[in-house]
Every structure is written in structure tokens, then in C-alpha cells.
Amino acid sequence: MSEVSATTEPAPSTPVDGAETQRYDPHAIEPPIARAWTEQRTYSLPAELRTSPPDPAQSPYYALTMFPYPSGDLHMGHAEIFTIHDCLVRHLRMTGHRVLNPIGWDAFGLPAENAARNRGADPRAWTYANIDEQRSTIQRLGYSFDWDTVLYTCDPAYYRWTQWLFLKLYRAGLAYRGEALVNWDPVDQTVLANEQVVDGRGERSGAVVQRVPRTQWFFRITDYADELLDDLDTIDWPERVKNAQRAWIGRSEGAEIVFHTADGDDEIVVYTTRPDTIFGATYFVFAPEHPVVTRRMADDPDYDAFLEAVSRRSDVERQAGKDGYRLPFDVLNPFTGESIPAYAADYVLMDYGTGAIMAVPVGDQRDFEFARQHDLEIRVIIHPTSEDGDLLEPLDADTMTEAYVGPGVMVNSGAYDGLPWEEAKQRITADCASKGWGTPKVNYRLRDWLISRQRSWGAPIPIVHCADCGEVPVPLDQLPVELPEDLDFQVQGSPLDQHPTFKHDVSCPQCGSGDATRDVDTMDTFVDSSWYYLRYLSPDDDTRSWPVDAAGGWLPVDQYTGGVEHAVLHLLYSRFVVKAMRDRGHVDADEPFQRLLNQGQVIMDGASMSKSKGNLVVPGEVYETYGADTLRATMLFASAPEDDIDWADVSTTGINKWLARIWRLTLEQINREAAGDPAIDADAAAELEHATARAVVDASADFDARKYNTAIAKLMTLTNAVLDATREGRGGPVVRSALETLLTLLAPVAPFLTEELWHRLGHPDSVHDQPWPQADTTLLVTDHVEIVVQVNGKLRGKVRVPAGADQQTAEAAARADDRVAGHLDGDVVKVVHVPDKLVNFVVKG
RNA sequence: GCCGAGGUAGCCCAAGGGCAGAGGCGGCUGCCUUAAAAGCAGCUCCAGUGUGGGUUCGACUCCCACCCUCGGCACCA
């Protein structure tokens, strides 16, 4: 303590000793606390709570954040996700929940393989080195994960069960090998799922994707199309994500209608959503690869050339034009009996519908463009109407410039003339059915999930190809099919394929024949991540994939936090896996994630951050300068969780000053208490109590609504109130109480600072174990309120009235105000009174 | 083209029928200091809420149309 001479008046507001004025130094206080949390497993749940069904009495809560891919140290996006997530988790714990908060690594993937090829790195060593770096950053930043749950998808102990999942799906007929036109990425040298192709380019490599026929493994996700669509209504996700999934599934209702070739040799089914327009079908189009066409044209070198040219085109090129090939036969329109020309054109896709269409140029823009280009008949079969059914100008085939897709009544359509198009659609569909010409049909845009990858840093597909038995699943007790340690990444093509023993050193599990090879493809890494939230329940269990009872109790995940870039891919695949596993009795849940929060992006000057743009900020730098609490609070204060953060607009220094102010105010209070300084007076105390109660109510509402930016604003307001109250250098119990409340409310945001100050205030326990503060709402009740007085809706004055005053009282008080009276010259025709809020006089004249 | 989200002060952003301003940044002035930084105190006069209509006693807020910005989807018959 300082040596204050007895003759000197105490100077309460100014600490005189260096020890008491010590500055806020996050680098001194944070690391020891972070170390203790890690070493003592402070935030781990007892394992038995994870492996058995949770007890509802403990308010169990499964909080999940998307596990990181270890391509280097954490970036700002990770820091934002984890900060939001951790704030949520810490707040939940303080409000009485038993929170399961696991972490792991999505550790298979191409970057490791590329590092191996380009730099000779060992993919495993490279991956685990990155994981170590990320883990250390996560711990320094105070994210309160359960370190007992850690899993790595590249660990045989994990991918053994990824292979188990594959085999379960295989046994159920949900995994199959089939030939299809697939997306080939020439840069990454692998096929891609449709979901991984954006604008015709590989999502990862950016290379223009080619469509090539290949035999590959698929998961039959289309079996669940309807349920995946319908159950979107049962989950609490952002509307834009649900819409993205709805669009991706692409359900449409129409009919399949049977056409015949004019020679009567072939029957061809088409799918259409507009059976009502069939009288306008003036030509017919096949996908170039359609089997009827390839069979009939088998000996035609000219067609071969066309097919060859088409197959070389990327999707981007395909969309550019309306090329077609006139086939040497016609097709009969079942309704008109007419013979219409048949074409092959690549605007018709083999893998949607039936791969053939009836073309109605008047009502379909693509058909219209094709008809114009190839000089085909455009037949008007609909007369446009307004939405209300009023007749509009008729269409003119010669002058129209685009297809008509609006409402109308049928014309030139035989018995259906005069019917509104929707009614015609129903009648024609029904008539098709009764005549045996077709059936109603629901179609989806969703395709099966292609999971084969010609890559080697992934989970091997557990299948053996036997010369006699065909494809044979590896028995469950022989899992995992392990990746060899000594893959050579310098070879051309797939290292796994060319490994000296992996492929051939195997016998058929069924017949024992040595004439067998292993499947050399690995699974899409999205398979790894489609079930990891189940594995978190028992990551070390080598007897089962997950505890079934516990999974049914913990799922669905209560809150999932992560980037919106997974709107379709990962989130759709995970939903499929849960539904498929549910139907096999492995988990009692319909959905994996009940509630989803998509955090915004961290950008810089309106653009995404990247090394090449030179605008990259990494969490490590911010940490080095200001510490973890400032980084966290800055992230949370910068914007609402869903909104983007433009790092150019944020002020780490402002937040840092605020935290330093809380530090100083608390140490000053501690000094005053030690010195026995006087307390603030009663009025100031009452005011501060009121401000504290106000902050508890307001901040709690914001925390509940996950609006951490405004919650922090409320905490700043309380900080300012403490500052005001202690200006005279006095403190006392009300100030202490206000500070303790502030620290408790701030704990989820700035876990280190609050913990340190909590201890310094004399509490041996952790601030993070405190119950969430409850406000004394009686402090918020006031006997008088200020109400607004308007005349014709314009503000004319303010008056004080007793709380809860009736209209008569309020009106009288308002009329007594000089400023108001001056505006009440005309007739008052109406008075609007909103209790405790306002009085509005409506004046005429 | 279709579907979302959003346009509020010099800047980032609050307010979701009832006083346009919670919070921050930046700026200015003063105190403290040999000085600077930090800290503290005070000030920030200028927006009427993208544009045009409508509903209402009253609209940033609800409705309609349009403009701009940012995302997502897009030859799916």
C-alpha cells in the first residue's frame, strides 16, 4: 500500500501507487486463464451425459458450430463464427443450460493433397500441424469448447465409421454405382457433385467443368426429395436458406405423356408442366444422348460427329446457343394426330425428366428461340387474359418476340377451346390418364448425390470389385479400409490407384478369389461432414458409430452456427443422412439442425479479404495488439450476427478503451473499499440502481434475441452510468453491485477481463458460473412519466403526469401547457390518448 | 429474368405505428502533463429516414410502384 502521511487528506479519486493504477494488460491476464480452462477441461461435459439421453430437467442444449477445415491458421471468418457461437454458449450456461459444445476438424480435403503434390509435404503431417495451430488460437481466444469431444475426419477411428455409414446406405439400396454424365473438373482431376459446380465452374478450382459419362458412386438423396422439401417447414432456419434448398430440390408438378414415332417403332415419354399447351407442340426434341436416338442413329457418322461436338461442350457453352440436329424421323402428337419433326438438341438435358420434350414455342421461351432459329411453326393455342380473366390482345405468331407464359384461355385446342389454361391443364392430364396416354407426374430438379472422388486424401470407398461376385462390400468387422501411409503424390492421376499394394493386395470378401481389386476412389468430403455432429457424442467409441439412445435425445442440434455458403451442400446432405439413418433405426430424429444462424462475412472496404488483394487481416494480428477480449467484443459490436462486418469500419481501439475503462473503474472501486472511502449519496445511488436494473432488462432481452451488438451498447450505457456516479471519487455498495452486474453481463463477450476482475473483487469462484442477473423491476417503476403532446400529429410539447394517468388527467395537463395551448385555436374534433405515452389533439380549421 | 436482404447524421449503426437517436467511430475545445500518449470533462449547430403515391389522429416503421446496393438461383421442359 502507499504510505499516505497522517497529515495529508486522502485523495480518494486518485490512486497514488503504481500497483493500484496498473493498466489493463490483456497479455498479462488472458494467457494464464486460457491455460487453466484448457488444462482443467473447464467446459467439458462428463462423458456419460453425452453418451446417454440427456435429462430434460437439466435444460440440455446442443450448440454446434461448423467445424473448421485446417488449411492454415484461423481466419477472420472463423473468429466471427466462433465468437458469436461462444457468446451464445456462455450466455446459455449462465441461464441454466447444460450445454454440449463440441469441436473437431473437417480434416480430409484437397488442400492437403495439393500441398503434398506441390511441396512434397506429407498430407497427414501438414493437416495435423495446421490443426495444432488452429487449436492453439481457439484456446487463446477463449472459446469454451468441450475438448473431450475432439474428432478428426481424417483419423481412421473416425472414417472407419464414415465407411460404416456408406455400407449402411449401400445395404439399404441408398448407395449405388451407376453411369451418368458427370462433372469433370480438369484442374482438380476429379468428378464433382452438382452442388459443387457454380456457373459451370468447379466451386473450388474455378475450372470450366466438362460433362463426361462415367461410372461412379451415388447416394440416392432423391428418394427423400419430398421429405427434404416438406420438412423445411418444421425447422427454424433463415428464410433465404430454406428458399435456396427449395429451389435446389425444384419440385414441379405436371404430366408424363406418351408419344410415338411416326413409323410406330418407338414409344417416347415426355415430361411437361404444361400439358394444356399440347396442341401447340409443333416439334419434338431429344437430348442428344437419348437412348432412342443413339440406337436409331448408331450407324450415322454425321450424328456421331454432332454427339462428339456436344459432349465436348461445357455447360457454359451449352447455354450460349440453340443448336439442333434434325433427326430423320417424325413423332406423332397424340392429341392432334399430326406428324411433327424430331430434333436432337443439347438444350434438352438427359438427366432431367425423361430426356425428351414436346416443344411448344408459343408458350416456352427456349422452344420459341429454337423455333425461330430453325424456322419451325409457332402455333398460337392460348388467348392472353388478365389475372381476372378479361380478354387481352390475341397473340400473333408472326410478330411475337417472346413466348407467352401468362394466363389465358385455350384456342385451336379442339375440345378444350375456351377453357382457362389451368382448367385445361387438369382436363388434359385427366384425359391422358383415361386414354392411357400418360399420367400425372411430380418431378424434381434434385439429382442423386455423386460421392466418388478420384482423390487420395479422403475416406476410401469400402468396396471390393471381384471378377466373379462383382461389387462386394467390405465386411463391417474389416473396417476401416485404411489409407496407405506411403502414397506417392508425384504420380500422374490418382495416387491411391497407383499405390503398389492398396488396389491389388486384396481378396474377395465373399468368395475369397484373388482376382479382385479395391475401389480406389474416396468419398466426397461432404460425406465426412454429413454426420460428425452424431460422432461428437462418443468420438472415442470403437464399438459403434454413435450411441443411438443419446443421439435421439440430443438431436436435433438446438442451434447450429456457420457460414451461409453451406446453404445447400452440407446442410442438405446432413438432412438426408439423418433421415436415412432414422429409417434404419439408428437415430430417432427427423432433422439434424433445428435452428440455424448464418453469420455474415468479414470483409474489408466492401470486398472480400484475400492475400492477393493485400487487405487481409488475421485474428492473430488483432490478438497480438489488443488481446482476445477486444477481438471478441469488436466482432460482436460491429454488426448484428447475420450482417457482414466491414473491418474497415470497425474500431478495435474504441472497444479496447471501453474495456480498459471497465478495468480502471473496477480497480478504483477496489482501492476505495480498501481505503474505506465514503459512498455516493442516496440520489446518485438510486439513479445508479435504476440504471443497473435498466441495463439488466435491456441487455438480457438483447442476449436472448442474439443481438449482441445492441446488448453491448446497453453495457456501454451502464458503464457510463458508473462513470457518472463515481465522478466525485466515491463508491460504496451500490457501485460495487453495479460493477458486479456489469461484469456478469459482459462475461459471455469478454470472458478473460470479467474473470480477472471478478476474482479481484474477492470472489473465489468463476464469473462464468454465476447465474444470469435478474433485475429488481420495482426499481424501474416511476411515479411520474413524461408524455408527448401532439397537435395534428406534430410535436408541440411535453408534460409530466402521474404514471397510469387517465385521459382526463393527461388531457388537462396537456391543455395547461403554454406551447400546446397556442396551437388549440380551432375546434378540437378528437383527442387520442395513449397511456403513459402521448396525447394527440386533432384540430379542424 | 426469378427469389432474398438492405438503403436513417461525416462514418458504422439503433429505433419495427407514438419525442428520429441507444451505442460507437471520427472531429473540436478544455483539464492533466516539461511535452506527447493515455485518461478525464464538455461540445458535435448540419439528417427528417432512397424516390413517388396510399392507409392512419399520427409512418423510418404498414401497403403499392419505382430506383440503387449486396447476396443466391437460373436452358430443369
Image (cartoon, coloured by chain):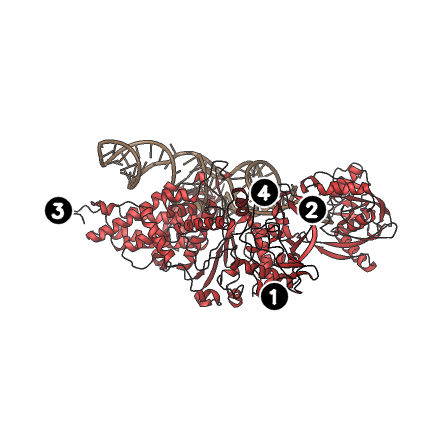
Chain colours: A red, B brown
Q: Position of residue A442 (x, y in %)?
A: 71, 56
Label 1 vs 2, first from the N-terminus: 2
Q: Secondary structure at mark 4?
A: loop
Do the residues marked 1 and 2 share a common chain? yes
Residue A205: which numbered mark, if any? 4
Q: Position of residue B42 (x, y in %)?
A: 31, 38
**Of residues A66 and A107, which is closer to you in this image?**
A107
Label 4 vs 2, first from the N-terminus: 4
Q: Which label sits in the foreground, 2 or 3?
A: 2
**Left of A282 or right of it: where is A640?**
left
Do the residues marked 2 and 3 share a common chain? yes
Q: For the residue carrying disc 1, how many other residues have a C-alpha within 10 Å: few (<14), some (14-19), or many (20+)? A: few
Query: Does residue A392 appear anywhere in the picture?
Result: no
Q: Amino acid at mark 4?
A: Ser
Q: Quadrant of residue A221?
A: bottom right
Q: Residue under circle 3?
A: A5
Please give the chain letter of the residue carrying mark 1: A
Q: Which label sits in the foreground, 1 or 2?
A: 2
For the image shown, how many numbered marks are present on the structure?
A: 4
Q: For the residue carrying disc 2, how many other residues have a C-alpha within 10 Å: few (<14), some (14-19), or many (20+)? A: some
**Left of A147 or right of it: where is B73?**
right
Q: Position of residue A463 (x, y in %)?
A: 63, 59
Do the residues marked 3 and 1 share a common chain? yes
Q: Residue under circle 1?
A: A584
**Left of B32 or right of it: where is A356?**
right
Q: Which label sits in the foreground, 1 or 4?
A: 4
Q: Amino acid at mark 1?
A: Arg
Compute the Cα span from label 1 to label 2. Answer: 34 Å
